Image (cartoon, rainbow, N blue to C red):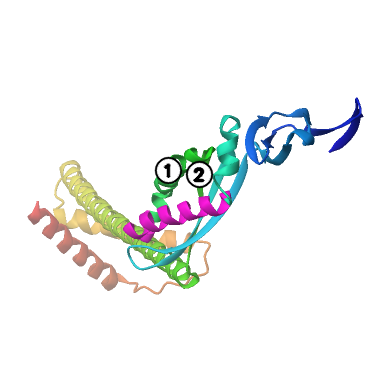
Amino acid sequence: MLFVENMGGLLCCVQVDQSTVAIKERFGKFDEVLEPGCHCLPWFLGSQLAGQLTLRLQQLDVRCETKTKDNVFVNVVASIQYRALADKASDAFYKLSNTRSQIQAYVFDVIRASVPKLNLDDVFEQKNEIAKAVENELEKAMSAYGYEIVQTLIVDIEPDEHVKRAMNEINAAARLRLAANDKAEAEKILQIKRAEGEAESKYLSGLGIARQRQAIVDGLRDSVLGFSVNVPGTTAKDVMDMVLVTQYFDTMKEIGASSKSSAVFIPHGPGAVRDVATQIRDGLLQASAHN
């Protein structure tokens, strides 16, 4: 405040900063709202400055403890952004003695009326609806006092520490159970596919052996028939014995030519060859009978 001498009288000059308004009174009664700038207040005429009111955006964080529908105590933190209206500066200055306490009381009232209707999970999911309810209630109440509610946010919902730990354990157990189910299902699929592969492999192996044996039988039969036609007087038994002896010596030759050091003991002599021929002939006759 600056005092200057003017024409033998004392005048009081006051400066109002930007984003601020001042309340001027005359003889204790509201006179006018002073805009930012320099103003003259002649104190000898009863003029005085009652106070100043900021028009800047202000923020109030309110922590409210309440209980949910499923009997869980939680701390709900609401962030209120508000400001005084320049055209209602007199109402904002005179009608409320403690603006922040008034806003806090309305926030408590709305939150403690809304949260007990919801379960804990629903409180997290519907926090935007709770914030909107608080904002609507504050807007209706504070507009009569010259304040504008710019935005209301629910910035945090804090259950009791034991409740949070239990919720985390439930979540972890559910995820472990899901992972175990997925792992078991994957192992089941692998076992099924492995069994199907083994069955298919055995089927194809058996089919190949059967075709191989059929080819051997067909080849021996053709050899016997061809030899009987080209060499008159020979019987099928003679041709079969000769073929088997040839196969026997070819096998012996392949075993002897092998570079491996494995030793193979087999019976050798006319009797052994005759026994082998008898066994193969019986098998050939059985295969022909089945065909």
* Figure disc tally: 2
Residue 52 pos. (x, y %): 69, 40
Residue 88 vs 281, above or below: the answer is: above
Q: Is residue 106 magenta?
A: yes
Query: Which of these two is toward me, 136 or 215?
Result: 136
Whether residue 67 is visible, yes or no, is yes
Query: Which of these two is toward me, 278 or 118?
Result: 118
Given the image, on which type of amino acid does mark 2 rest? Thr
Residue 282 pos. (x, y %): 15, 63
Q: Are marks 1 and 2 in contact (CB under 8 Å)?
A: yes
Q: Is residue 245 magenta?
A: no
- The residue identified by callout 1 is 132
What residue do we see at 51% from left, 46% from top? Answer: 153
What residue do we see at 92% from left, 30% from top? Answer: 5
For label 2, the crowd category at 10 Å Cα-Cα, with few meaning under 14, some 14 to 19 and many 20 or more, is many
Distance CA(mark 1)–CA(mark 2)? 7 Å
Q: Under tag 2, what secondary structure?
A: strand
**Sequence-wise first label, 1 or 2:** 1
Q: Which mark is residue 152?
A: 2
| In this rendering, position of residue 245 left or right of residue 100 | left
Q: Which residues are magenta?
A: 99-122
Q: Main secondary structure of the magenta part?
A: helix
Residue 247 vs 37, above or below: the answer is: below
Given the image, on which type of amino acid does mark 1 rest? Lys
